[in-house]
Image (cartoon, rainbow, N blue to C red):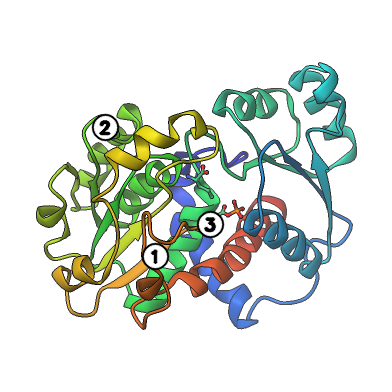
Amino acid sequence: MKHLLSMADAKDEVFEILSIAEDLKSGKIGGKPLEDKYLGMIFEKSSTRTRVSFEVGINQLGGTGLYLSSKDLQLNRGEPISDTARVLSRFLDCIMLRSKSHETAQQLAKYSSVPVISGLTDKEHPCQAFADLLTIKEYKGSFDDLKLVFVGDGNNVCNSLLLACAYVGMDMTVACPEGYEPDKQIYELAVKEAKETDSTITVEHDLDKAVEGADILYTDVWVSMGDEDELEERQCVFKQYQINQELLDKANKDAIVMHCLPAIRGQEITDDVMTSDASAIWDEAENRLHAQKAILYKILVE
Ligand code: CP
Ligand code: NVA
């Protein structure tokens, strides 16, 4: 794996990265393995978790992180992403990019001679999926015989989770309104990969049916960054796609609740569920740090 733009880029390294994350979290891997390494972090969109966890993570590993708002870079004045990639590659050892369009991330990777990690695009969020897998493993012990139900929009977070589940052999059902299914190409790839790991990937528009036998209920905002123009329409279409106590009661007895955050209480999730004993959300957020350190370690040390 040179770049990590899609979960598919890490197909053969998923378990290894998870194991590194566990070792970093437990302290089994210590020291400053990224001493003298510089990570540039370009943000075209807002971020709390991705920004802070990457910055803290690279520092804990002995390296240096540089926050680069796209508004302050010459990108904002029209410098091509290809030139930006060529030049930043001369200064940095790795570039993390949160971009409005997946194509921008692909262009950056194409012209960069150093590894590029996606910190979210409109299409995928692989770093989030790694933190999610780590969290599920911690709560459930393994990925065997588990069913994850993603409730809501078939968005970037959902797309990466589809591939993540397929690679580790976990069943996943996307419960979404018609017209809001995940990316067709990613879905088809996940269905194909799931066959290799004896798991199933499905889309179900009937929420009650979807939630039957669920071990993990996962949701994300109805309106992602970049979809703000569709706010009113989405608030209508997604109304019933909410993780609340009533829905949780229909899942398996020991089901956990996950959310990548930020959350909008009263829309895709209720406050009581977020703060209930079933919520794995805060550990999931912390695991962004451990998962990303593992990704950096895998890419820059190994
Ligand atoms: N989940 C996530 O990526 O959060 P931020 O947008 O705060 O980085
Ligand atoms: N789907 C959300 C995820 C935020 C971390 C978005 O793209 O805005």
The C terminus: image quadrant: bottom right
Residue for point 75% across, 22% down: 81
Q: Is residue 252 left or right of residue 54?
A: left
Residue for point 57% across, 23% down: 103
**Amino acid at circle 1:** Met
Question: Is the residue 276 above or below the residue 37 in the image?
Answer: below
Q: Which residue is mark 3?
A: 262
Q: Which residue is mark 2?
A: 188
Q: Is residue 89 left or right of residue 103?
A: right
Residue 19: % across, % down: 50, 68
Question: Is the residue 241 above or below the residue 154 in the image?
Answer: below
Q: Residues within 10 Å of mark 1 (few under 14, many from 20)?
A: many
Q: Are marks 1 and 3 in contact (CB under 8 Å)?
A: no
Quadrant assignment, res 279: bottom left
Residue 159: % across, % down: 39, 41
Q: Which residue is mark 1?
A: 258
For the residues labelled 1 and 2, the Cα–Cα distance comes to 24 Å
